[in-house]
Amino acid sequence: MRLDKNFFQKNTKHLARDLLGTFLVHKTQEGTTVGKIVETEAYLFKNDPASHAARGKTKRNAPMFEAAGNVYVYFIYGVHYCFNIVSGKEHEGEAVLIRALEPIKGIELMQKRRGPSILPKELCNGPAKLVQAMGINKTHNQSSLLNGPLALHDKNSFSTGKSKINIVRTTRIGINLGAELPLRFYIQNSEFISKK
DNA sequence: AGCAAGATTAGC
DNA sequence: CTAATCTTGCTA
């Protein structure tokens, strides 16, 4: 079942935890891809120098200040895109970066997009990799997960064997400022999280 | 106007 | 370890 507004309208740190185990679903003309979220990072508005929203609203980060459940896609290093889910009770300027997925459906389509010889474990184990595998691009920026071709489904939507998960909390990856803040969350023992 | 750094990844 | 090479923010 597609998750609604109530799921997203909450404290960003809580959303980053609650997103683990849910399913990102993208329907396109090429086919449908589904990935289970196994790794996330929270980016806050206050006291978080690593966040794009740290210096206020700009043209680029404006989607972060819109409704919870919206999508924020940004271009980085002149090469890659990263995918975020906007959170917060109001338009707080906070979001959750999705860092890794476990491929569930459409693995052949993911390989078509990423490379035919790439193993399932390597298809979505990084923020820019999963964007490419899922067929997400700049056109999804500022769209909503509440409706449209890109959606988030609850934990019971697809059977993946394990029902109970343990969540590990650590510091975030790939940042210099705010590197000491424990805002990264992942599913313990998952084979699909990004490398450290 | 110029420049350095950035929520990354693939390939020497 | 480094190239790839876009956007932002700071300095002049």
Image (cartoon, coloured by chain):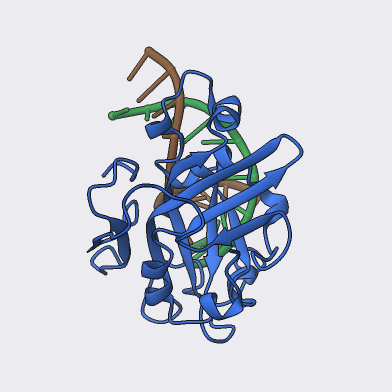
Chain colours: A blue, B brown, C green
The residue depicted at 60 percent of the width and 62 percent of the height is A72
- Residue A164: give x, y in percent of width and height: 28, 60
Task: Identify the residue at the far bottom of this view.
Answer: A90
- Residue A24: give x, y in percent of width and height: 54, 54
The foreground one among A148 and A170 is A148
- Residue A77: give x, y in percent of width and height: 51, 44
Q: Is residue A47 visible to us here? A: yes
The residue depicted at 45 percent of the width and 24 percent of the height is A118
Q: Is residue A10 left or right of residue A40?
A: right
Q: Is residue C4 left or right of residue A15?
A: right
Q: Reply above or below: A104 against A185.
A: above
Task: Identify the residue at the far right of this view.
Answer: A29
Q: Reply above or below: A149 against A86.
A: above
Q: Is residue A93 visible to us here? A: no
- Residue A85: give x, y in percent of width and height: 54, 65
Q: In which quarter of the view is residue A126 placed? A: top left
Q: In which quarter of the view is residue A149 placed? A: bottom right
The foreground one among C12 and A99 is A99
The residue depicted at 23 percent of the width and 66 percent of the height is A180
The residue depicted at 53 percent of the width and 32 percent of the height is A107
The foreground one among A166 and A15 is A166
The foreground one among A108 and A159 is A159
Q: Reply above or below: A107 against A179.
A: above
Q: Is residue A169 left or right of residue A134?
A: left
Query: Which quarter of the figure is the C terminus of chain A placed in?
Result: top left
Report how many numbered discs are placed on residues in the image. Answer: 0
Query: Which quarter of the figure is the N terminus of chain A placed in?
Result: bottom right
